[in-house]
Image (cartoon, coloured by chain):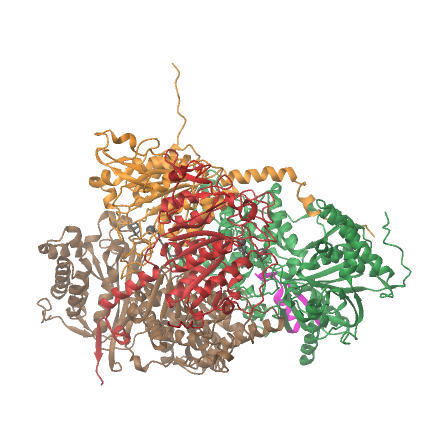
Chain colours: A red, B orange, C green, D brown
Amino acid sequence: MTMVVETARLTQKDFASSDDVRWCPGCGDYGILSSVLKVLPELEIPKENFVWVSGIGCSSRFPYYVDTYGFHSIHGRAPAVALGVKAANPKLSVWLVTGDGDGLSIGGNHLMHCFRRNLDVKVLLFNNRIYGLTKGQYSPTSELGKQTHSSPFGSADRPVDPIRFALGCGATFVARSYDTAGAHLVDVLRRAARHRGTAFVEILQNCHVFNDAAFEQITNKASASANQLRLENGKPLVYGEAKDKGLALDPATLSLAKVENVGSNGSSKSLMVHDESSPILAQFLASLSFPEYPVPLGVLYANSLPTYEDQLHHLDIQAKETARGGLQALLKSGQVWQVPAA
Amino acid sequence: MTMVVETARLTQKDFASSDDVRWCPGCGDYGILSSVLKVLPELEIPKENFVWVSGIGCSSRFPYYVDTYGFHSIHGRAPAVALGVKAANPKLSVWLVTGDGDGLSIGGNHLMHCFRRNLDVKVLLFNNRIYGLTKGQYSPTSELGKQTHSSPFGSADRPVDPIRFALGCGATFVARSYDTAGAHLVDVLRRAARHRGTAFVEILQNCHVFNDAAFEQITNKASASANQLRLENGKPLVYGEAKDKGLALDPATLSLAKVENVGSNGSSKSLMVHDESSPILAQFLASLSFPEYPVPLGVLYANSLPTYEDQLHHLDIQAKETARGGLQALLKSGQVWQVPAA
Amino acid sequence: MQNESEVPSNKPEIVVNGAVIRFAGDSGDGVQLTGQRFTSAVALAGNDVATLPDFPSEIRAPAGTLYGVSGYQLQFASKDVFTPGDSLDVLVALNAAALQTNLSDLKPGGLLVVDSGALGAAQLKKAGYATNPLEDGSLSGYQVAAIDISTLTRKAVTPVGLSTKEAGRCKNFWTLGLIFSIYDRSLDTTLSFIAEQFKKKPQFAEGNSIALKAGYAFGTASELFHQRYRIAAAPRNPGLYRNIDGNTALSYGLIAGSVCAGRHLVLGAYPITPASAILQELSKHRHLGVTAIQAEDEIAAACLALGAAYAGAVGICCTSGPGMALKTEAIGLAVATELPMVIVDVQRAGPSTGLPTKPEQSDLYLAVHGRNGEAPVCVLAPATPAECFTVAYDAVRIAIRHMTPVIILSDAYLAHGAEPWLVPDVDQLPKFEQTALPPTELFTPMLRNDVTLARPWASPGTPGYEHRIGGLEKDYDTGQISVDPLNHERMVRTRAEKVARIADDMPECRIEVGASQGKLLVIGWGSTYGSIREAVAQLHAKGVSVGHLHLRGLCPFPRGLEAVMSAFGKILVAELNSGQLAQLLRAKFCLDIKSFTKIQGKPIRTDELMDRILKESEDYS
Amino acid sequence: MQNESEVPSNKPEIVVNGAVIRFAGDSGDGVQLTGQRFTSAVALAGNDVATLPDFPSEIRAPAGTLYGVSGYQLQFASKDVFTPGDSLDVLVALNAAALQTNLSDLKPGGLLVVDSGALGAAQLKKAGYATNPLEDGSLSGYQVAAIDISTLTRKAVTPVGLSTKEAGRCKNFWTLGLIFSIYDRSLDTTLSFIAEQFKKKPQFAEGNSIALKAGYAFGTASELFHQRYRIAAAPRNPGLYRNIDGNTALSYGLIAGSVCAGRHLVLGAYPITPASAILQELSKHRHLGVTAIQAEDEIAAACLALGAAYAGAVGICCTSGPGMALKTEAIGLAVATELPMVIVDVQRAGPSTGLPTKPEQSDLYLAVHGRNGEAPVCVLAPATPAECFTVAYDAVRIAIRHMTPVIILSDAYLAHGAEPWLVPDVDQLPKFEQTALPPTELFTPMLRNDVTLARPWASPGTPGYEHRIGGLEKDYDTGQISVDPLNHERMVRTRAEKVARIADDMPECRIEVGASQGKLLVIGWGSTYGSIREAVAQLHAKGVSVGHLHLRGLCPFPRGLEAVMSAFGKILVAELNSGQLAQLLRAKFCLDIKSFTKIQGKPIRTDELMDRILKESEDYS
Ligand SMILES: Cc1ncc(C[n+]2csc(CCOP(=O)(O)OP(=O)(O)O)c2C)c(N)n1
Ligand SMILES: Cc1ncc(C[n+]2csc(CCOP(=O)(O)OP(=O)(O)O)c2C)c(N)n1
Ligand code: SF4
Ligand code: SF4
Ligand SMILES: [Mg+2]
Ligand SMILES: [Mg+2]
């Protein structure tokens, strides 16, 4: 019999920084922090190789609470900062935290380019459908007509959907969970961590102070099962307390139709089966509108493509083939002439 | 018999400005200009109510060549400038010209927000897959691996697809044509002009100097019919010289499958019929990859939704209900007190 | 109706000229509201008042932490008041952390009101106290009123049926009632405020009203307070008054400007502390022709304001430091296209994100110099909260008359500070001049007005004036794109001259207070007005040869500035930065100007400036 | 092998010291290439040379238009040359528009070579000529060589089988051959260049070679030219030389810096004229540890450079005015986080889009003052194309040693101008100092080096130094977020002092040429070096009491500046803007400094500056 001696593993405690957590009591961000702290030690990455990068917002305070390297940058620019970090040192595990304002209002362009490049970073977007840090103005994910400090007569802006946006920009991993989802959130974060390339996770988050209960219907225990469509790859799309409701393709209308009493009448074989690798299915899922349909949670789409880092590595190979020596060689390249000593 | 006396209509000439056109000889922009000049007089909008807004780039020189109001702004910001123009005067007909760099690199975020707001402007994106004005660097639509001045070993950035991006951002009208398409381009522009809300038109454009023949396979007479999928609402998806090829839904793989010998074997009834109002069909079309599939041209998606201007108007109604008098009333609102004359 | 709690007290009443009070407590304690209500009450009673709110950037910092303390200071008096005061007559500390961070500002012998119910062991520890200050003698230099406000409030409010937590939230009104009793104020306006504010939550309305009255009754009855203070109304010009803070005044000024110009106002703004309130205020007034758009970022905000200006509206954007930095390129386009646009920068402490809720005057360089190329713009700065109205109005007027972007530099202190304001009569506001369009045949986009050098404002929708404009250099005569070398120089110099001529449109420079010639001239700009004025006035009254000049125009400088300066032997610029105005003045006038600087995210104190003035005066002799 | 076309000529040979030549033609005429090849040839032959390329912002402006004219001017000589020359000895005009726009710069009696084949009626009309200048006597003041270059080229090249259009494109090499013959130069290096350049298109290689030789032969044989000129090699220090333009030199300097620092270089850049060439150059050298990323915009470029700096690489970004404006906020973050980052601004004429291809020095204010809050950075400026190498290298060195962003101000003239460069020996480059990390137990992110005040550069991946950083104000001791008032002031002053101490790391100020004390000191910075030096040297040689000081450090100013200035009675700053450096110096030193300004998108001419110097000297006496 061999004895397995466990080497000292990192624990959750190792990743909790000593900073006072400065979110409001009751903020959903606490739940996300605790799920993140559960996942990090599992990844078997040395502490010093993690970098948490954020923009500005309540959500963007996140890096202070994780005892790794961290960069609390400026509003909306975290993806750009992260690109630089990875370009300097591709072996780092870089995690971005952004908000619905930080990531989709001022920072939308950088997020788009991050997605299309497939930079190998994890992007956690805390969507509370409000500007928290600036005290309650509407955000790009706020509902049309929402009354806030900056929209006393209701917002005139149609919201953007983070998931559809990410898919439209060519993101290779797109998932959704919520602040208090516990094991579900941990699972999704774990999947994101393992994805090579940009992993986008929308996390529905409750802003207790300025937009309380925005996701109540989805997240509260009583209505959760009716309103959540929990996705599992290879499994049919079912929901409801007894998993007795499902979704099936209606080719005539090119949409997903609801099927009741799944299982009892054996209709489950006609149900749509989740396939993470299908970009079109992801679109079907992304366009389900709540509350008519349940909200898809889990990994909507995952596809393995070369990362930006892979491409850079490829350039290195190309460059080496044509490389013409070191620095001195460079300086004296081109047409040169020697002036002899007089 | 009644005599119909035509009132003096505007003609193409009325819209051509006297400025020297400063594009390179052979540039695709000339063809676009001439199609635009054909459409404008048709719209029966007084000249002074047109505003052409652009960013910076070869394409963005466009406003100088149309004898209406025009604003050649700064790189990437045309959608924001246009938002201001429309907010100040919603009855203006505002047209944006942007490039693949202007609109999708530096200006991507503004375009996204323009789409989601459904601002009633027409957006013409001249996609030449290169930076023209700065003399030949790769753009966000350049192919992966493309060698340019700024990517001597090939570009490391996966391109973004303008159409998929627009759909992901919630654009309500999405179409595609090309510089030398003549009547097709004129048709698409006409449709865009009539759409209420943001009308996005990707125009494939040849940069003769820095990216010549980028769309040769699609646009040249010889291969055009094989490589173009010309969309017509309510008509089946067919292509090829004899319209003998088509596309049909494959529900198993959730994709469009090619069908050969359409018509001869009657298979045309199984073909997918174009439906501009289907967001999912638009996604199917947008994900067809060339050269395996033909390139969809025409209106991929059109959906009538309230415009941003409609929403503002709605706010006006709300505001009027609660309005509390004029300026003087505002100034003396709140808790006031009178200091009597001594 | 006389409130039953406002029983006539039999305590002796002492007449004083004024008082400085600070309310301090946890962010959740409602300190800002308390301060605002007190300010409102004393102003309504005819006192002059100046305020200094100070709060953390955390939304709800964890309870009891030092960085979570929120404060609201005010000075009110029977004479004109220019600052919120240096040191406190009364400190109200609603928890241990507030006591810890604020005590040093209380005058020796001053009144300390402290909630003893919030000084539990854990709270004291969090606030860094090893021992209970109520017991260790460390408060012996003050007049201490330790009251278990938490418990008293809860008890008073319980009958209404609020939960313990909800009842605790009424603590601020209890405290307010107490202070009202000490300063012998009526509760009426506060009670009607409560009724209005909690219209939809009658339980809260009742709880807060009861708490207010209970605090008042406690103050009247308690032996802790031996006397009441009476502060008479300040003499004032007749008219209708209201309290106003800088952000509101600024918003009103912008609206008034656009209404009087007969133009729509289009605001492009992106929320940012401490400027968000302007966006929020302007959003309310669509019926006055105001369209306030929350843009996707500050660049879009500036560009949309500019687009709106092109289309004939008054284009406005408002922001603070980091957002201002982002507008740099767009403001350059406004310079090149010569369109009327007003950019408001409510300054906060930098660099970068800095101290987001604290005032500083360190964006002056950015406003005056922060653009690529030669890109002069007009820069104005209001001196007091109420003056934000005047300056904003003027900014709109100048932008339109001179066809130029105008930057207004406010700051976090002006933004939140409040003072009584004589409501202007709309018909008496300065009139707008707008150059009429030339006949279409003579029109070019760059045809300039002889007096102002302003170009014509021809907007889309106007037949016959179709033209193109942009950021490329334009021909002086035709307005077409031009790369001609001499034309470029001419255009650069013309744009500069256009801005320089705005000085003709500003009031001449004049001394605010003190000597108009003599040893020392103290120059200030923006929110330091009150401190400088007070310091100079006090010393001048004592015979020191010192005068105070305050600049509202920072670019161009007002006419007569050189003459005023030359009447003094020495010049000292006092500002909340490293000496930015001093450097600009030195550059322009080549005078050896001295700097008083403070970069602490706090206003200048009168006493510290007085010390410096005395020192400079001594050095001088 | 002696080329058959290079037949020994029997024309008289005149020895001259130097010459100023300008090639001018349509954008499509290949004028830039002609100029570059001529420069290369004369430099290889040992002449000193300075160049001035000048081209329109249109890619291919419509043929024959005035705004479509492209020019390339150079001065080459048997002695040191500092400017491309004021007026031309030789003007080569390849079309009517080029003749129209360039003739006024030709010296009276100078040689005009004009392609008479490009002076057709339509072309003349487009160029604004009512009559043919060859016939109307308007060229009588010059030595005119009207040659039908178009036809002669086509004829020479036809045998190779090129199309008429392609044959026409060889015109520039024909012209080059002609000028080579006049200045008696060998064709060898040009022929090998052609062979290399058109390796993949042998027909073009042959066509251009034939054209070159034909032009040479024509020049030798033609009676139009009565003599040849000989310009001897300039005396030079021994060593290996090459020609280099400013953008290339700057790129090499950055690479050399990062290689010598033992760090990766990460460039974030977004294309913009005239800075794109730096992005393009750096993209070629991945094998030297360079990652050049074309970012989505300038904000991303700056942020990624900063992210890279955080992660231990040298973070660089390069841009021009409008892009610089966009980086304002990100540079503020670099100041707050105290990370080593180099920002290159290749200035062009503004404001806004301005004149995108023309030089100007009008971003100085933006570089020094253009950030929100108190945000000082180091600002450096190279004086010549070759010096771009040194300054870029130094910028990397200073950024790392002092842990600060450094801005380099180049301009369109330096960017494209070229000069011979003594290739440095890599082993002789200044060494890098990098403060070692303290032991982990002592580490805080803000622990400062006593000498430089630099904080430690601890990068992700290094165990034990995990820390968080950002744009909020930090505690001086712990590096944690702090809102303490005195701490903020201390941090602001410390960051300023850190930048001020960089002066200890720069060479002391010294006079470039002329008097080191006396009546007038002319101060310059950046690309005006040559003009100022030349003007001062010429007048000083004539006995005028004038000296030239050139600043490489604009923030901080170099040590000893005050001393140098105080040795002169009067100071004149010459710059390509409205007087920005003059204002900064006035502000700092409180001296009544005068300005020579020029804002025409063109370098200063030696003669115009000499006039002003004389005037100032007269006024003085
Ligand atoms: C350039 C700039 N503009 C604006 C701000 C102000 N600001 C800080 S956070 C924020 C939005 C926060 O919303 P979100 O990203 O949704 O984060 P949350 O606070 O809701 O987590 C804004 C507008 C800033 N700091 N910098
Ligand atoms: C802020 C800013 N950055 C960069 C530039 C330089 N620039 C001008 S146009 C352009 C890109 C042009 O590409 P595209 O939008 O595709 O237009 P095209 O010229 O191809 O029509 C760039 C990078 C600029 N003018 N302003
Ligand atoms: S304001 Fe909202 S999002 Fe921010 S910390 Fe408080 S509860 Fe959380
Ligand atoms: S560079 Fe290309 S896109 Fe620009 S004008 Fe020339 S051909 Fe057209
Ligand atoms: Mg949010
Ligand atoms: Mg392009």
Residue placed furthest toward the right: C10
Give above or below for D555 relative to D108.
below
Spot the residue most to the front.
A1
Question: What residue do we see at 64% from left, 64% from top?
Answer: C68
D11 inside magenta stretch: no
Q: Residue furthest top?
A: B1
Q: Nearer the viewer, residue D617 or D93?
A: D93
Q: Residue A224: x, y in percent?
A: 53, 46
Residue D317 lies in quadrant: bottom left
Q: Is residue D135 above or below residue B224?
A: below
Q: Can you name the residue that lies furthest to the bottom here?
A: A342
Residue at 43% in and 82% down: D508
| Viewer-closest of C178 and C312 | C178
| Residue range (magenta) | C546-570
Point out residue D348 in the picture as x, y percentages from the top left corner: 39, 62
Q: Is residue C564 left or right of residue D521?
A: right
Relative to residue C244, is residue B268 drawn left or right? left
Viewer-nearest residue: D543 or D550: D550
Q: Position of residue B74 (x, y in %)?
A: 43, 53
Q: Nearer the viewer, residue C317 or D298?
A: D298
Spot occupied by residue D327 in the image (x, y as percentages of width and height)? 45, 62
The answer to whether residue D466 is above or below residue C162 is below
Q: Is residue D407 visible?
A: no
